[in-house]
Amino acid sequence: MPERSESLADEPFDGRYPTSHERMTGLPWDASYHDGPAPWDIGRPQPAIVRLASEGGFVGAVLDAGCGTGENALHVASLGLPVLGVDVAETALAIARAKAGDRGIEAEFAAADALRLERLGRRFETVLDCGLFHTFDGDERSGYVTSLASVTEHGGTLYVLCFSDDGPDTGPHPVSREDLRAAFAPGDEWSVMAIEPDRIQTRFHDDGAPAWLATIRRI
Ligand SMILES: C[S@@+](CC[C@H](N)C(=O)[O-])C[C@H]1O[C@@H](n2cnc3c(N)ncnc32)[C@H](O)[C@@H]1O
């Protein structure tokens, strides 16, 4: 049997155009999950998300866009909320489903392109982006924001936890406050409620990397 190629030239990407990150690395996102845990895959939910959940930040149906192996989605689902995690990496989704089964947590994981969320035909009161927004380049961000608007209930809340450009030892793809404000610019779709400094834990930072936790209301 021929070896499975993971080069951009050979990989069909399930009919979708590769993201800027995939074009930059030359590999589909799925490859990040083939050789042990990826740098962001810390085997537990992000402390910022646990805190947010403990403060009642998640209500109603929840979407986790770019859920990876599902730790954040599973944490929210363990609180009794209906959660859908979507990702383009089938390997990550398989790991997430296995964890849900092992832990006896009910959560749904499905392959979907976060840049085309309208295809889900569903709406969510709370949407989480943990580590996805910062992987998109400027051109992709406007389409992503439109895609998010298509699945977020009016009055619902979007949380974006992303690497920030503020402080030493920043993670890859640092984002500025202005980048976030520009992506969710005042208009008739979004209202940025808060952009607070936080941390994203990784497998390579002792105390995490500087992050922003943005709370954005769907108008
Ligand atoms: C940095 S990882 C974060 C994963 C997870 N949220 C976490 O905190 O562990 C980014 C995730 O987004 C997924 N992803 C990238 N582009 C995507 C897209 N267009 N649609 C859906 N998922 C995407 C990747 O496969 C990867 O699992």
Image: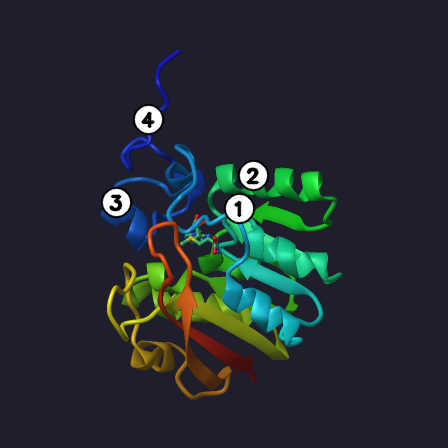
Q: Is there CB contact under 8 Å for labels 1 and 2?
A: yes
Q: Which residue is mark 2?
A: 95
Q: Which residue is mark 1?
A: 69
Q: Is there CB contact under 8 Å for labels 4 and 1?
A: no
Identify the residue at image location x=50%, y=80%: 216
Identify the residue at image location x=48%, y=52%: 113
On screen, 15 above or below 134? above
Identify the residue at image location x=27%, y=72%: 165
The mark that comes first in sequence, 2 or 4, is 4
On screen, 87 above or below 167? above
Q: Which residue is mark 4?
A: 5
Give the number of the mark in front: 2 or 3. 2
Q: Residue furthest front?
A: 206
Q: Position of residue 87 (x, y in %)?
A: 50, 49
Q: Residues within 10 Å of mark 1 (few under 14, many from 20)?
A: many
Q: Which residue is mark 3?
A: 25
Q: Where the C terminus falls, by quadrant? A: bottom right
The mark that comes first in sequence, 3 or 1, is 3
Q: Position of residue 119 (x, y in %)?
A: 56, 56
In this figure, which colouring scheme has been used for the structure?
rainbow
